[in-house]
Image (cartoon, rainbow, N blue to C red):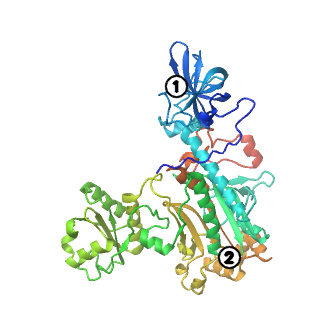
Amino acid sequence: MTPAPPPDLSAHPATSLRTDRCGDLRAGDVGRAVSLCGWVARRRQHGEHLAFVDLRDRSGVVQCVVDGASELRSEFVVRITGTVRPRPEGTGNADLATGEVEVGDCQVEVLNPAEPPPFPVSDRVEADEATRLRHRYIDLRRNRMQRNLVVRAAVTRALRSAMDRQGFLEVETPLLWVPTPEGAREFVIPSRLQPGHFYVLPQSPQLAKQLLMVAGLDRYYQIARCLRDEDLRADRQFEFAQLDLEASFVSQDDVLAFVAEAVLDATEAATGARPDPIERLTWTEAMERFGSDKPDLRAGPELVELGPVFAQTAFRAFVGADCIKGMRAPGQGDLGRNRLDALTESAKGLGAKGLVWLRVGEGGTLDSPVAKFLSDAERAGLVAAVEAEPGDLVLVVADERPTVRAVLGQLRLDLGRPPVSEGARRFVWITEFPLFEGLDGEGRPVPAHHAFTMPHPDDLDRLESDPLSVRSQSYDLVLNGWELGSGSIRIHRADIQSRIFSVLGISEAEAQARFGFLLDAFRYGAPPHGGFAVGLDRLVAILAGEENIREVIAFPKTQSGLDPLTGAPAPVAPKLLAGLGIKVLPAPA
């Protein structure tokens, strides 16, 4: 599904040099004298003197009929003055918004000549990414890239409008901060005035926005710039933007409603269609049904529990298994053995002991190397449980429950996930995450979110006795399999916070040293509060139909963290390092 064109954000194109934008001219403008400015997208010679010049600016392209334009070349910056007129009959261009008209009687002023660009400024020709990023200012002239940035601007404007409408106050938080307990590696900034001391760039405004709640701001938001020194991939950059919000005197349902209003408004602004209300799943439901805590609801059938079907099985691979689950892959029963063997190896690579595959034939018959080891009742029960039809492929994994979920969840995506630009936009809330994600090397619980997440009230009595079973009041927003963001209700009570620190093995002195400024603030009247952060880059990428967030960021880094345009990161002059008291050591082996 191709994303709908976003609204145009330019309200007043006229300046002292131009009266109109190229892409705005229509049949209603016929007879009007206009002055246009832009880049020569294409010149087509017609006879000895006459030429058709396609003039391009951010709004689009219009055809200009120019006499004596032999000096014009692609990407020259020009001003063209002329009269709007209908195109001759039979020469209209339905692919252009301006295709019914052209500009004639043209006078051309070259504002700046241009050398030939390193690659064509056309969506029909795709240059390699390194070249595109090295000459990003050329890449951004392309229609696709400009459209992506228009989508981004529309999304940002809609998010701000929704937050303002819901009574949130936009507040900026510092970019120079202290180390925070959120787990990601931070960028460190040396202090010149306090040698040997350092700031960090914020990986989120988490603690600052909680302090704003203590300050009585009640409802805060900002489009925040955040930085994390993590390995890059398609959905991650060193620096990123997020809609960050926090509110006091709220429940989880309140926060989810605030965020839903904003992201649905943004989706409608970018695509012209408002999605359905956001679905909700608990973490356990998502893992059992989809094998993932960021499920793509478009990706076909769910995982099905098969324990009851094989409760009395004699098939050795299933006997005594902690969990047996299966799924159907609609219409994929014709996969060849090479592909099936590759799926089996993929399952083993994800930790499974093996993978059972079965092709479904007419009348529910099963074609598989293991079919002969299953009873008639088991074969019929399997087909019925996964609702398989002739022509389908059925996959079954028997193993430890976490392994079964992870393996089938990935195979579900491998076999059924559509591209980002196709299918519906399926938002889903994931709630009730585990409070702890496991144990560290010393047997202490590791927070799944951060140390200030409120436990689920029904599980508080197990906090010390069985911490890994405790649910949290945290929640994620997922769109088409991409995690857009996360949030939680925060701990505002000193007694609960002390219990969390104790379980984590954090002493009172250590807590004061690491989080003292926040804990001290809580002594002066912290309201119940909670918040969320929506990843702006990821949201825009999906709405624009892009698989990589680099395509919706004006000046991104490569996957290796380099900026081919500027050459960053670059060495710093020894004099500057000396002034900061820094000595560069050899890179570790």
Q: Amino acid at mark 1?
A: Pro
Residue 442 lies, in percent from the top left, at: 55, 75
Mark whose residue sits in front, 2 or 1: 1
The alpha-carbon separation of the residues under discs 2 and 1 comes to 71 Å
Nearest the camera: 4 or 438?
Answer: 4
Residue found 31% across the figure and 66% down from its top: 395
The count of marks equals 2
The residue lying at 58 percent from left, 56 percent from top is: 268
- Judge left or right: residue 205 versus residue 129: right
- Which of the marked residues, 2 or 1, is nearer the chain's N terminus? 1
Q: Which residue is mark 2?
A: 491
**Is 221 left or right of 455, judged from the image as shown?**
right
Query: Looking at the rendered structure, which numbered label has been put on residue 182?
Result: none
- As shown in the figure, which amino acid type bears the numbered disc 2? Ile
Looking at the image, which residue is at 68% across and 76% down? 491
- Residue at the far left: name it: 372
Q: Quadrant of residue 177?
A: bottom right
Q: Is residue 336 visible?
A: yes
**Residue 332, placed above or below residue 526:** above
The residue beneath circle 1 is 88
Residue 131 percent coordinates (x, y): 53, 36
Give SS at disc 2.
loop
Q: What residue lies at 63% left-to-right and 42% top-to-bottom?
A: 568
Q: Is residue 553 above or below residue 463?
A: above
Question: In this view of the protein, which residue sits in the foreground, 336 or 480?
Answer: 480
Where is residue 405? Give x, y as percent.
41, 70
Question: Where does the image place residue 486, in percent across and percent down from the top left?
Answer: 59, 65
